[in-house]
């Protein structure tokens, strides 16, 4: 006879409909559902494969005297002092103490109720990341819980930190995943042969990755036990197998069923633009442009990946393709991952194309209904030749008269379905597609993962741009760095200060930036200091960026929202705090925000000692070279625990579990597995549907 617990589990399992849309769950209205969809989450089933980035250890308390800077921990104590301080902005400052030590807590966002809860004499439990030096630690906006004489029990499992989007809290994501997990028993294990190879089955793997036990050898790891645990290996192999199956199917699809418009204009518009340019295109730009124009002239759809390091001039190549399509009588859709980057492309394209008589429509998220309606009507009847925007371009209401070319910038930041949805807007034919990325893909991986794409590389920098000098400086010399900023801005240039990445919470990341800006304003009162972070309203953040671009701000304190889309030629100095916590590709992207003018530029990587051997080797690679492809290869060799902080949490939906650098060694096994499964049509179809949805045609850009 089954136990009551087993019966309850069976009831919960039966009650979870994995195919149900997330709007059927409590707390998921239309606005939340839209944010979830940005993460590729549409059904309850999707939550099972939305795996944590890392874990927090709330299974043990750390005495205040044992807290270490930069290491998040759970700690408790009694409030000995609390006051509201009025400086440049109002803040609540709380002193928390135990028998041996104390720590300062700062809150920039607080209400009267929270102020009462943190009154002297109250015992609290907090979780956060201390900063400063031992003996003088502080913590900005820790999570706080009031505890009585009988403290609540500690967590029994590590706490997962999921990839998130603005407006989605970790508590909501954890609750939704907890709702879906009992239903995983309804998922068939489509690759039982992996269990025979010593890997866990599907269900144990999912359980372990969402709720790893609190064990001494895992609690400090960003992932359980090692950079790729057996559970993660199991799921990564299944996902790579599904992608390889889709590629096999795609390669056997007759090409003549997928016709594209033949774009072969005389090239008058491109020649007119070249004559007006104040510079000559590089040899690499000329070569890649010729490759693209040759593709556009074919009746088969172009599917070309253009890789170009930061500042290599990819936009000009895209403009050449755009002018060819427009001159041939077709429209172009130009898609960027953020409104900031889309607006920048809009400015650049308007400057180059409008004098040639090309009409541009910018579709953003903050237009009035009348403005948007007018633009949509003009696109639908062909009055507007180029549409520039974010994910707004692939919404159902956006219709084109004769879409011939889709250009997608920073392709890894879009989901597969999002990128390919533009292909459904071709009115009977398949538009050509040009995919661009400034995130260099290691050559070996490009061959394996992008075999169906033609690939071009822009491997020259435009003349006049000097390499950015990179220095590694210990956090202990922070005052020297501040003086360097004073001198640089005093000489008329501008600077960035990038705050540490706190991927689990945009709120904590924002408050980290706010605290840093506050300290820098106190240290550099003569400078105009701006602030930009992900929790600001888009219009407000864009206004700060525009003010910085116009020269009204000397020093911009920012989170990684400036990773792409900011082009300020006068900015010649960048400081990146806690650089050892960021991925090499992200560091390289951030560094690319300086050195865009003719002024000698520098990037300072501030780190907290002591550095491990791997962390030091990674940062030394940044200091040694400005070559993004060399950096990508180094990242591939050295990637380890805690290094998965690059594009994944900012929207990389190319893969849900697999990682294009970490999992290179699994590609051969996944391909062999796909060839074995291919003949079992129902199983192959189910694998593809599980990982890519029903659209196997999307597989070409994995």
Image: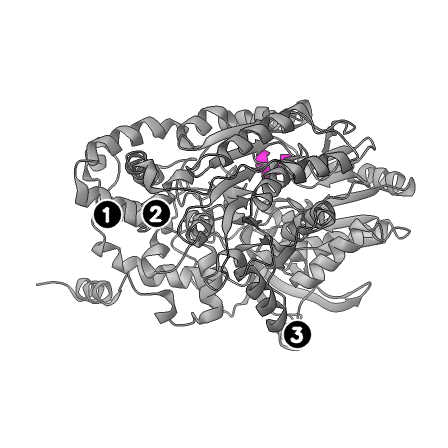
Measure how far apart labels 2 and 1 are at the Cα level.
10 Å
Measure how far apart labels 2 and 3 are at the Cα level.
45 Å
Q: Is residue 152 left or right of residue 367?
A: left
In magenta segment, residue 223: no
Identify the residue under disc 2.
692
Residue sticking out furthest to the left: 1
**Label 1 with label 3: CB-CB less than 8 Å:** no
Q: Nearer the viewer, mark 1 or mark 3?
A: 1
Identify the residue under disc 1.
686
Please say whether residue 59 is visible from this viewpoint: no
Taking the spot 35% from the left edge, 55% from the top edge, the residue there is 46
Q: Nearer the viewer, residue 436 or 33?
A: 436
Identify the residue under disc 3.
111
Image quadrant where residue 610 sits? top right
**Label 2 with label 1: CB-CB less than 8 Å:** no
Image quadrant where residue 112 sits? bottom right
Q: Is residue 218 left or right of residue 690?
A: right
Q: Nearer the viewer, residue 631 or 654?
A: 654
Please say whether residue 303 is visible from this viewpoint: yes
Label 1 packing within 10 angstroms: few (<14), some (14-19), many (20+): some
Label 3 packing within 10 angstroms: few (<14), some (14-19), many (20+): few
Q: Secondary structure at mark 2?
A: helix
Q: Nearer the viewer, mark 2 or mark 3?
A: 2
Tag 3 or tag 2, which sits nearer the N-term? 3
Image quadrant where residue 487 sits? top right
Give the quadrant of the C terminus: top left
In magenta segment, residue 583: yes
Tag 3 or tag 1, which sits nearer the N-term? 3
Give the image location of residue 404, x and y in percent.
50, 46
Tag 1 or tag 2, which sits nearer the N-term? 1
Q: Where does the magenta region start and end?
A: 582-588
């Amino acid at each position: 006879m089954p136990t009551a617990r087993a019966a309850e589990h069976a009831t919960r399992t039966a009650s979870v409909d994995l195919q149900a849309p997330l709007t059927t769950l409590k707390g998921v209205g239309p606005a939340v559902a839209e944010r979830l969809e940005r993460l590729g989450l549409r059904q309850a089933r999707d939550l099972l494969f939305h795996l944590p980035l890392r874990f927090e250890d709330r299974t043990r308390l750390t005495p205040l005297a044992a807290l270490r800077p930069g290491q998040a921990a759970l700690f408790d104590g009694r409030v000995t002092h609390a006051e509201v301080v009025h400086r440049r902005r109002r803040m609540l400052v709380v002193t928390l103490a135990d028998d041996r030590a104390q720590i300062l807590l700062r809150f920039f966002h607080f209400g009267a109720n929270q102020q009462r809860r943190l009154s002297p004499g109250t015992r609290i439990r907090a979780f956060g990341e201390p900063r400063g030096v031992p003996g003088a630690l502080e913590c900005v906006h820790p999570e706080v819980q009031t505890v009585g004489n009988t403290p609540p029990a500690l967590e029994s499992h590590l706490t997962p930190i999921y990839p998130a989007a603005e407006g989605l809290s970790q508590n909501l994501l954890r609750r939704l995943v907890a709702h879906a997990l009992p239903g995983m028993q309804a998922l068939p294990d489509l690759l039982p042969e992996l269990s025979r190879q010593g890997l866990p089955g599907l269900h144990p793997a999912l359980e372990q990755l969402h709720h790893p036990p609190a064990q001494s050898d895992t609690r400090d790891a960003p992932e359980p036990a090692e950079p790729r645990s057996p559970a993660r290996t199991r799921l990564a192999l299944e996902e790579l197998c599904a992608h390889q199956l889709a590629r096999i199917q795609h390669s056997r699809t007759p090409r003549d069923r997928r016709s594209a418009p033949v774009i072969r204009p005389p090239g008058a518009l491109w020649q007119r633009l070249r004559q007006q340019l104040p510079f000559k295109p590089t040899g690499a730009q000329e070569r890649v442009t010729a490759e693209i124009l040759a593709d556009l002239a074919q009746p088969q759809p172009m599917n070309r990946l253009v890789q170009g390091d930061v500042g290599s001039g990819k936009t000009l190549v895209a403009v050449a393709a755009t002018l060819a399509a427009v001159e041939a009588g077709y429209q172009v859709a130009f898609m960027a991952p953020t409104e900031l980057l889309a607006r920048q492309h809009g400015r650049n394209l308007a400057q180059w194309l409008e004098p040639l008589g090309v009409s541009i429509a910018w579709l953003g998220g903050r237009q009035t209904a009348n403005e948007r309606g007018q633009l949509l009507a003009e696109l639908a009847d062909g009055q507007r030749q180029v549409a520039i925007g974010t994910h707004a371009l692939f919404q159902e209401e956006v219709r084109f008269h004769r879409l011939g070319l889709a250009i997608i910038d920073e392709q890894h930041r879009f989901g597969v379905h999002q990128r390919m949805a533009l292909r459904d807007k071709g009115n009977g034919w398949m538009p050509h597609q040009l995919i661009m990325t400034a995130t260099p893909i290691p050559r070996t991986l490009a061959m394996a993962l992008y075999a169906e794409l033609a690939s071009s590389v822009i491997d020259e920098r435009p003349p006049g741009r000097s390499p950015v000098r990179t220095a590694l400086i210990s956090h202990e010399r922070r005052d020297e760095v501040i003086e360097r900023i004073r001198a640089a801005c005093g000489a008329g240039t501008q600077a960035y200060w990038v705050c540490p990445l706190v991927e689990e919470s945009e709120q904590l990341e924002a408050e980290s930036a706010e605290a840093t800006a506050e300290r820098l304003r106190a240290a550099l009162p003569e400078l105009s200091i701006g602030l930009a972070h992900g929790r600001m309203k888009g219009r407000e953040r864009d206004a700060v960026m525009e003010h910085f671009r116009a020269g009204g701000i000397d020093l911009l304190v920012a989170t990684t929202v400036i990773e792409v889309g900011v082009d300020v030629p006068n900015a010649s100095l960048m400081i990146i705090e806690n650089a050892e916590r960021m991925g090499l590709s992200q560091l390289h992207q951030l560094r690319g925000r300086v050195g865009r003018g003719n002024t000698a530029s520098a990037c300072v990587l501030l780190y907290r000692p002591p550095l491990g051997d791997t962390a030091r080797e990674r940062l030394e690679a940044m200091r040694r070279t400005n070559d993004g492809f060399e950096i990508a290869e180094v990242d591939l060799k050295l990637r380890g625990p805690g290094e998965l902080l690059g594009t994944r949490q900012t929207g990389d939906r190319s893969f849900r579990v697999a990682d294009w650098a970490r999992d290179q060694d699994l590609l051969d096994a996944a391909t062999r597995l796909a060839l074995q499964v291919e003949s079992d049509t129902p199983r192959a179809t189910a694998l593809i549907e599980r990982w890519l949805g029903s659209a196997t045609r999307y597989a070409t850009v994995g």
